[in-house]
Amino acid sequence: MKKGDIVTVVTISGEYVGKLVSMEDAMVELKDPRMILSNPNDGSMGFAKGLAATGVENPTSAIFQQVVFVVPSNEKVANAHLEATSGLVLAK
């Protein structure tokens, strides 16, 4: 994984998607981070408007500590993140 890749960060508090800024000293920094929400009734997923109930809406960056793991996001999630953070609509 390299800077600018869309990655998924799993922490003890949830799952987050964003553009990788850095990964060092047990910390991961993301640009345009979004928390993943899922609906157990129908299996759908989406992005929360923020990272915490009292945090700012649509944060521009975040640093995560106590990360369980980091993996590249799948293409569908990466494209959804791009649409959510840039306003672009990608061809299906």
Image (cartoon, rainbow, N blue to C red):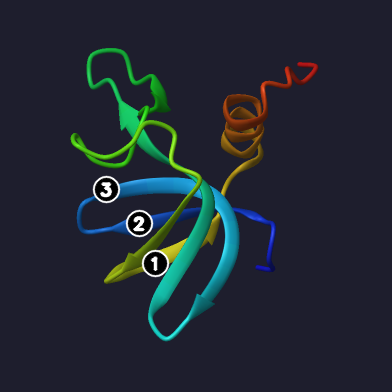
User: Between disc 3 and disc 1, whose residue precedes?
Assistant: 3
* Amino acid at the residue labelled 2: Val
Q: Is residue 57 left or right of residue 19?
A: left
Image side of residue 7 versus residue 9, left or right: right
Q: Amino acid at mark 1?
A: Phe
- Identify which residue is drawn at 42% across, 86% down: 25
For residue 46, the mark is: none
Whole-percent x, y for residue 74 in the image? 60, 43
Q: In what quadrant of the picture does the C terminus appear?
A: top right
Query: Could you give the CA–CA distance between mark 2 and mark 1, rounded to whole angstroms?
Result: 5 Å
CA–CA distance in space, label 3 to label 1: 11 Å
Pointer 3 and pointer 1: residues touching (CB < 8 Å)? no
In the rendered image, the quadrant that contains the N terminus is bottom right
Position of 88 compared to 12: left or right? right
| Residue identifier under label 3 | 14
User: Which residue is drawn at the image coordinates 31% and 13% (left, top)?
Assistant: 42
Q: Is residue 15 above or below residue 66?
A: above
- Residue occupied by mark 2: 10
Q: Which residue is mark 1?
A: 69
Separation (CA) of disc 3 from disc 2: 6 Å
Considering every residue shown, the one lying at the far bottom of the view is: 25
Choose the circle earlier in sequence order: 2 or 1: 2
Q: Amino acid at mark 3?
A: Gly
